[in-house]
Image (tube, rainbow, N blue to C red):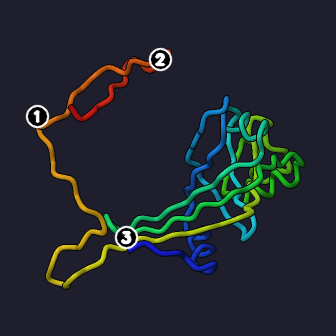
Amino acid sequence: MVGLLSCEEIETLLQRQCVGRIGCSIDERPYIVPMRYVYDGTAVYAVSAPGQKIDAMRAQPLVCFEVDEIDSTGTWRSVISTGVFSEITNDDERRSSLRYLGVAWAGSEGSDSPPPTSIIVFSIRLLEKSGRFGREVMADLGQAPVRAYKASPKLGPGDGFVSERHSAPAVGYDHLQLLRLG
């Protein structure tokens, strides 16, 4: 069974978790990266070193944020949100956000020294949020779970799979192989 999370369940999941995924675009290609975060009810806050993720979000601040929780094979919850990236550049706000995140830097203990510029602190203000949950339906407590989909038969060697090299001229992807039914 798959259903929708309530607004309260969405907020609870965002508060309870500490690892989410940012979805952004690099050179018109999707890019997803996990990150540790804290949520304040409006935005997620995170820290990063310079790199592709930061460059991509600076270029296109509209991003996607996803968090999930999996209890067992068939029991899960997830939240997906669109949001706007904003880099925190004010030293006092950076210091406060880093403390909120539980991040220390050299010279941070007992001092008001600003965090180094190599530590990038940012927020993603969540605009639209949606959440779903999944739960296996039990036909009888003594029976195995009833799946909401029809399982495909397992195929072994010689049962119709053909391995072939990817024929597209994409540089750097020649190690990938595609499987197709023969």
Could you tell which of marks 3 and 1 lies nearer the N-terminus?
Answer: 3
Vertical side of 12 occupied by 87: above or below? above
The three-letter code of the residue at mark 1 reads Pro
Q: Nearer the viewer, residue 145 or 21?
A: 145
Alpha carbons under labels 2 and 3: distance apart? 37 Å
Picture coordinates of residue 90 (x, y %)? 89, 48
Q: Residue at x 77, y 53 (%)?
A: 84
Q: Residue at x 68, y 65 (%)?
A: 39
Could you tell which of marks 2 and 3 lies nearer the N-terminus?
Answer: 3
Q: Nearer the viewer, residue 33 or 157?
A: 157
Residue at the extreme front: 182
Of the 4 image quadrants, the one containing the N terminus is: bottom left
Picture coordinates of residue 6 (x, y %)? 58, 79
Q: Badge 2 is on which residue?
A: 172
Picture coordinates of residue 181 (x, y %)? 24, 35
- In the picture provided, is 129 more to the left or to the right than 17? right
Q: Are marks 2 and 3 in contact (CB under 8 Å)?
A: no
Q: Badge 3 is on which residue?
A: 75
**Crowdedness near tag 2: few (<14), some (14–19) or many (≥20) residues, C-alpha within 10 Å:** few
The three-letter code of the residue at mark 2 reads Gly
Picture coordinates of residue 88 (x, y %)? 83, 49
The three-letter code of the residue at mark 3 reads Thr
Which disc number belongs to residue 157? 1
Q: Are marks 1 and 2 in contact (CB under 8 Å)?
A: no
